[in-house]
């Protein structure tokens, strides 16, 4: 199975080989979708692939070491009352999580495809997109 | 009766405004949205369409920068002749009589953070919110007061009128960016190296693209405006009918536009929104719908135009000039497909105009006409097709004469 998670960690944890341990000790395939670090700490968006039990144990390992772990669904949110379905976001979304549905004329947001890159945030004219990580 | 009207009367399927108005008033009118009408013509042809259909409803929802609203706030005691006016920190133009002011949609707050502008204040008012009104004055014998700081809402003001100088552009450009940095423009975020392309027209649903030579859209045309009813009051600024056109007469560049007016108190945030274009500023997202009477077969042919027959030009917005080079011409059908070829590269496209809301407006307008809540009007005067769009150059007084 596959799952996407958002990780938050403090500066002390930044020096630990967390990703390596997920691969070596928990037999997970790790795809780093986004990674950044500053004086407040680090943020990472990972796609984890492997057996369900290994993923569960890998996430437990992260939490046990003080890493904040959240599902990607909590990465970017669209306020559907604010969205006007113009479609500005469609051509800049690198993973096509935001897409135009020709049948309804609406813009769909598939949270599972979102990697919380944030390029849609300042591109949205009515400001319907919010990044939470 | 003019010669044209006489000859029209003789044409089979031709209808007068009076006939269509009577049908609407009697509840007998056949009304279709522009999308429904195009399907009908495809199956039945323009002759049958002209004979059977009375009105076609069009719609668009997009960023319309040249917009604003004027207000009359009522008189204070003692009275004030407002010289400078701010509404929620956004300056309104006050060089009018004592308590009138015009708030422009793109006016930004004085910190110039570009996030909050006149359009947002107008939306807040439409949402029923109260906004802070501040005004200063120099004081006169008849208007002694020199300042006021209070709150107003659509309930407290006398007039609140949306008055827009240029809306509803008949066609618009496609913007892309060949430079190595992201550009932030009124056409949205343009990614480097032809990373994307944006366009801003409802295409086949757009009002003026269904009436390419402004036969039924003129001064006095009643329109759906921001959720209420309004009127076309003049040609829009920069009106430019002489651009290149397709053999069917559809302009291939930004051409006509309309100036409109309507009561803000009737409007709804569903169709009126403050928008923010990063590093450009604010604009007003506005919904406009225009009914087009099918007076004859020629009108039916105009309204039958589909996205594959409507073309526009692609421009490179990294070219900082008023006359950018046309990279290519492209149809709205291609733009709607989500990807277009520019300079040998497949480029993803984005619309800045909401097709979803455009459809909603055309549908709502159709329902209102069928329920006899919306009556069509014959223009009291048509737009001039002779108008040209002139540039501004640095010139001497003599050269300007």
Image (cartoon, coloured by chain):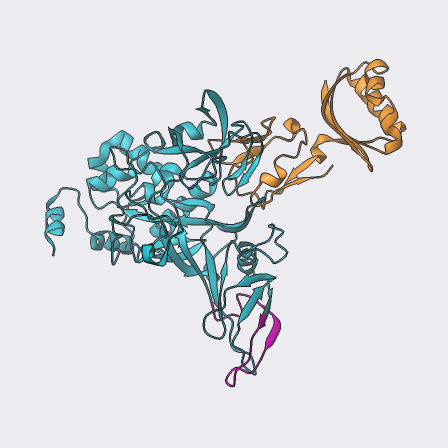
Chain colours: A orange, B cyan
The spot of residue B184 in percent (x, y) is: 56, 40
Q: Is residue B39 one of those drawn in magenta?
A: no
Residues rendered magenta in the picture: B135-159
| Magenta segment main secondary structure | loop
Left or right of A40: which side holds A72?
Answer: left
Is residue A6 in view? no
Tell me where residue A94 appears, x and y as whole percent.
60, 27
Queried whether the magenta region covers residue B154, the answer comes back as yes
Q: Quadrant of residue B183?
A: top right
B213, above or below A116, in the image? below
What residue lies at 74% left-to-right and 36% top-to-bottom?
A133
Marker count (numbered): 0
Which residue does the image show at 87% across and 26% down from the upper left?
A: A15
**The furthest residue to the bottom:** B141
Q: Position of residue B293 (x, y in %)?
A: 27, 47
Residue B185 located left or right of residue B387:
right
Which quarter shows the N terminus of chain A?
Answer: top right
């Amino acid at each position: 199975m596959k799952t996407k998670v958002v990780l938050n960690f403090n500066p002390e944890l930044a020096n630990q080989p967390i990703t390596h341990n997920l691969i070596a000790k928990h037999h997970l395939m790790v795809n780093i979708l986004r990674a950044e670090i500053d004086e407040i700490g680090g943020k990472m968006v990972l796609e984890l692939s492997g057996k369900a039990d290994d993923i569960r144990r890998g996430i437990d390992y992260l939490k046990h070491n003080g890493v904040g772990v959240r599902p990607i669904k909590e990465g970017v949110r669209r306020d559907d009352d604010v969205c006007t379905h113009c479609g500005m976001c469609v051509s800049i979304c690198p993973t096509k999580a935001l897409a135009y549905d020709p049948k309804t004329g609406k813009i769909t947001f598939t949270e599972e495809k979102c990697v919380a890159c944030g390029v849609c945030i300042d591109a949205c004219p009515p400001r319907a997109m919010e990044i939470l990580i | 009766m003019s010669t044209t009207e006489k000859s029209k009367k003789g044409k089979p399927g031709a209808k007068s405004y009076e006939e269509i108005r009577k049908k609407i008033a009697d509840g007998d009118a056949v009304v279709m949205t522009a999308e429904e009408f195009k399907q009908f013509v495809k199956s039945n042809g323009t002759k049958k369409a002209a004979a059977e259909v009375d009105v076609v409803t069009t719609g668009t929802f997009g960023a319309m920068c040249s917009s604003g609203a004027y207000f009359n706030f009522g008189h204070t005691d003692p009275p004030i002749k407002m010289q400078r006016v701010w509404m929620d920190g956004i300056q309104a133009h006050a060089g009018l009589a004592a308590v009138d002011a015009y708030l422009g949609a793109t006016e930004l707050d004085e910190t110039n953070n570009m996030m909050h502008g006149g359009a947002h204040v107008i939306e807040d008012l439409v949402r029923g919110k109260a906004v802070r009104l501040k005004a200063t004055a120099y004081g006169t014998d008849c208007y002694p007061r020199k300042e006021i700081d209070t709150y107003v809402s659509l309930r407290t003001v006398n007039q609140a009128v949306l008055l827009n100088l240029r809306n509803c552009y008949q066609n618009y450009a496609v913007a892309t960016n060949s430079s190595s940095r992201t550009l932030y423009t009124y056409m949205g975020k343009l990614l480097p190296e032809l990373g994307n392309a944006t366009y801003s027209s409802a295409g086949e649903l757009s009002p003026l693209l269904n009436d390419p030579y402004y036969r039924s859209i003129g001064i006095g045309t009643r329109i759906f405006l921001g959720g209420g009813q309004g009127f076309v009051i003049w040609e829009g600024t920069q009106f430019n009918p002489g651009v290149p056109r397709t053999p069917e007469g559809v302009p291939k560049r930004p051409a006509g536009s309309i100036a409109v007016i309507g009561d803000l108190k009737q409007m709804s945030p569903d169709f009126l929104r403050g928008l923010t274009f990063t590093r450009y500023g604010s604009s007003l997202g506005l919904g406009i719908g225009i009914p087009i009477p099918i007076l004859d077969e020629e009108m039916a042919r105009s309204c039958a135009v589909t996205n594959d027959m409507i073309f526009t030009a692609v421009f490179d917005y990294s070219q900082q000039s008023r006359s950018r080079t046309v990279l290519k011409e492209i149809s709205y059908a291609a733009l709607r497909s989500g990807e277009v070829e520019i300079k040998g590269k497949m480029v993803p496209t984005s619309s800045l105009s909401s097709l979803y809301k455009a459809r909603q407006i055309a549908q709502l307008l159709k329902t209102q006409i069928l329920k006899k809540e919306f009556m069509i009007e014959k223009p009291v005067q048509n737009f001039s097709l002779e108008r040209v769009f002139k540039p501004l150059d640095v010139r001497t007084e003599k050269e300007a004469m």
